[in-house]
Image (spheres, helix red, strand yellow):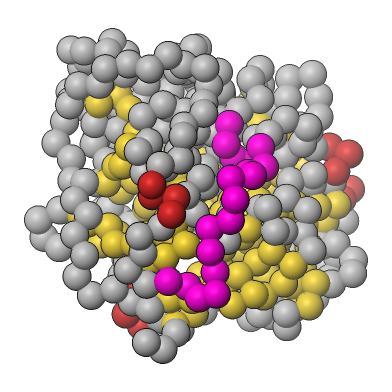
Amino acid sequence: MPTLNARASILAYVRLAPLSLAALFFPAMLLAACGGDDEPSRTSEPAAATSTSTGAGPVPAVGLQLVAKGFSEPTFVTNAGDGSGRLFVLEKAGVIRIVKDGQVQAAPFLDIHTLVDSEASERGLLGLAFHPRFEQNGRFFVAYTASNSQHADTLAEYHVAPGAAKADPASGKVMLAIPDKYPNHNGGMLAFGPDGYLYFGTGDGGGAGDPDRTAQDLGAYLGKILRLDVDGGAPYAIPKDNPFAAKAGAKPEIWAYGLRNPWRFSFDRKTGDVWIGDVGQNEVEEVDLQLAASKGGENYGWSALEGTHCFRPKTGCDASGKVPPVFEYTHDEGCSITGGYVYRGAAVPALAGFYLFTDYCTAELRALRGDGAGYAAVDLGPLKKGPSSFGEDEAGEVYVLSDSEGAVYRLVGVGR
């Protein structure tokens, strides 16, 4: 497990008063996603160009506003896009709860805990996405680790009657089940893109250093972002323009590959660009970027590369055809990236266009934006400990979960 360095004391440009980085007692949920897989340390070698500067410049004043608490190991928060203003909070054990007007509703929106394996640190209910026409059709999709002998990384569809506050657990239909023999690197992010297709992020399956070499294997679902047409067939259809739809031996669902654990990725709601926070092994955390004009098929390098550094082999690795991250940082600065969103809300206008992310170990809120010469990150101050995920509401305001506190916070502007 990486050792937290002086960064944990947080030399912030702006402090989120009265917040502070608490003592080093972190739950197990995401720490196993970092480079603590008993992989021996190694000598890294630059393999491709990168941009890792940390210039300052104007720094927005940002604070946190408590929205709701009392959740058990929250893993994700999102909205339904139905104009209701509701937030939906996932709990690792297999329950989705509704927050309405700052109040946690007594009845869960969905309870599938009997189907979910949440015993290991990174298993559980991990992803949720509502159909773009959810208000009319009541369809939504979840990603979870199945409580079966294969511990399958599972994508399932559920249904709720229009206007109803509770979904029927019996309405669930498994769409894809990927056997996963290791307890970590499960991915689980779900999001609909501007094209109307459902994107599903999978980790490399776990174990130290991608032992089964899944991330570079186009014949495996693991270590990928998949792209599915949930309206074109049952349980889904393959979009005709998926990059490997016609490639012999490849899984036609694959949109991008070479990922270790894309715990959270997101679409910029203004540009359509995809931002990917990919959790590293022992040395490097990375942010990958896929522009909206992409036709898919990007190879982000794992496990030949960890960020821009050789991983397999330790020196002289083949970086050809692999897309380097737009930003990376070493484990001198953290241990497990939590990817977020490009800010498009109104509460903090100075954050517009910045990609927000953090690290589970340091809990430092960071903002990234390109300046024509590369990408630079600025530090905005400490979050509550154990930031397990970000989320957005219908207006584009950004939320962050505290795994250790079981709470949801909203990012807000503060006076100087």
Residue situated in front as seen by the camera: 54 or 167: 54
**Residue shown at 89% from the left, 48% from the top:** 170
Q: From where the camera sits, is residue 391 visible?
A: no
Q: How many numbered markers are drawn? A: 0
Q: From where the camera sits, is residue 166 visible?
A: yes
Q: Which residues are magenta?
A: 15-32
Residue situated in front as seen by the camera: 286 or 276: 286
**Residue shown at 15% from the left, 53% from the top:** 374
Residue situated in front as seen by the camera: 376 or 276: 376
Residue 235 in the image: above or below residue 273: above
**Residue shown at 61% from the left, 64% from the top:** 78
In the rendered structure, does residue 226 fall within the stretch colored magenta?
no
201 relative to 309 in the view: left or right: right
Q: Position of residue 24 (x, y in %)?
A: 58, 45
Most common SS among magenta residues: loop
Q: Quadrant of residue 9?
A: bottom left
Q: Quadrant of residue 320?
A: top left
Q: Position of residue 322 (x, y in %)?
A: 24, 29
378 relative to 109 in the view: left or right: left
Q: Position of residue 215 (x, y in %)?
A: 43, 23
In the rendered structure, does residue 24 fall within the stretch colored magenta?
yes
Q: Quadrant of residue 346?
A: bottom left
**Residue shown at 11% from the left, 60% from the top:** 372
Residue 320 in the image: above or below residue 273: above
Q: Position of residue 163 (x, y in %)?
A: 80, 76
Q: In which quadrant of the rendered image does the C terminus lie?
A: bottom left
